[in-house]
Image: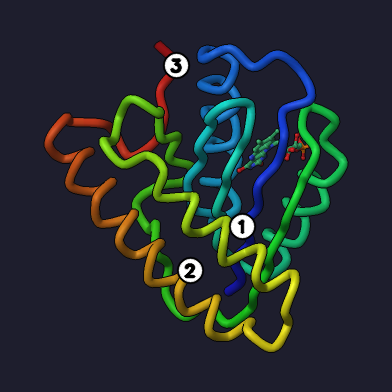
Amino acid sequence: MKCALYTSLAEVDFSESKVNELAYLASEKNRQLGITGYLCFNQNKFFQYVEGPVSAIDKLVKNLRSDKRHSIEILIESEEVQDRIFAAWSMRYVKNEELPNSHMEDYLARNMLYIQQNAGQRQHCLDNIWNQLQKISTVLDSYAKLKNIPTYPVIH
Ligand SMILES: Cc1cc2nc3c(=O)[nH]c(=O)nc-3n(C[C@H](O)[C@H](O)[C@H](O)COP(=O)(O)O)c2cc1C
């Protein structure tokens, strides 16, 4: 298994319903490919985490890199994934108002930046990232249960 996480800047106008639609289509496709993960959109910036079979993630990363609707800032890939962190979500779109601490991704982004700047810290930063992703996943799972959110995004 492999994972990839990145931050990117929107290059077109993304309304709430546009992101919702994007997440829905992504979720449908990911389900067929065995990809799971989550997506955030905040102040014109995307954060996405994906995990799944190596070939599926490689193909998705290639698609994401050439997708003109956004431009990737930092991208981290790792093949050291043992278990899925977001097993129930083929693509969970996390709306900003949904969680009290929706800035949990800031911590991830800082660690991604460290990896880019200092390869020697890669393992330490990856451990931080995985710990944080576990926490985020736990929060998202209990929130979804509480609010009866289906395990894939639905267009409203
Ligand atoms: C922010 C963002 C996140 C995306 N996430 C996914 C995703 O999780 N899965 C996916 O298949 N496509 C995703 N896409 C769309 C891909 O970039 C690409 O359009 C799609 O994989 C094309 O697939 P196809 O040409 O095989 O139909 C995303 C696009 C953007 C802009």
3 or 2: tag closer to the N-terminus? 2
Report the Cα–Cα distance between label 3 and label 2. 30 Å
For disc 3, the marked residue is 155
Report the Cα–Cα distance between label 1 and label 3. 24 Å
1 or 2: tag closer to the N-terminus? 1
Type of residue at label 2? Answer: Ile
Q: Secondary structure at mark 3?
A: loop
Q: Nearer the viewer, residue 80 or 136?
A: 136
Q: Secondary structure at mark 1?
A: strand
Q: Secondary structure at mark 2?
A: helix
Mark identifier at residue 129 = 2
Q: Nearer the viewer, residue 1 or 101?
A: 101
Identified at 48% across, 68% down, the residue is: 129
Image side of residue 55 versus residue 95, left or right? right
Vertically, is 132 above or below 149? Answer: below
Looking at the rendering, the quadrant in which ligand 1 lies is top right
Image coordinates of residue 59 in percent, x first then y, are: 77, 55
Image coordinates of residue 39 in percent, x first then y, are: 51, 40
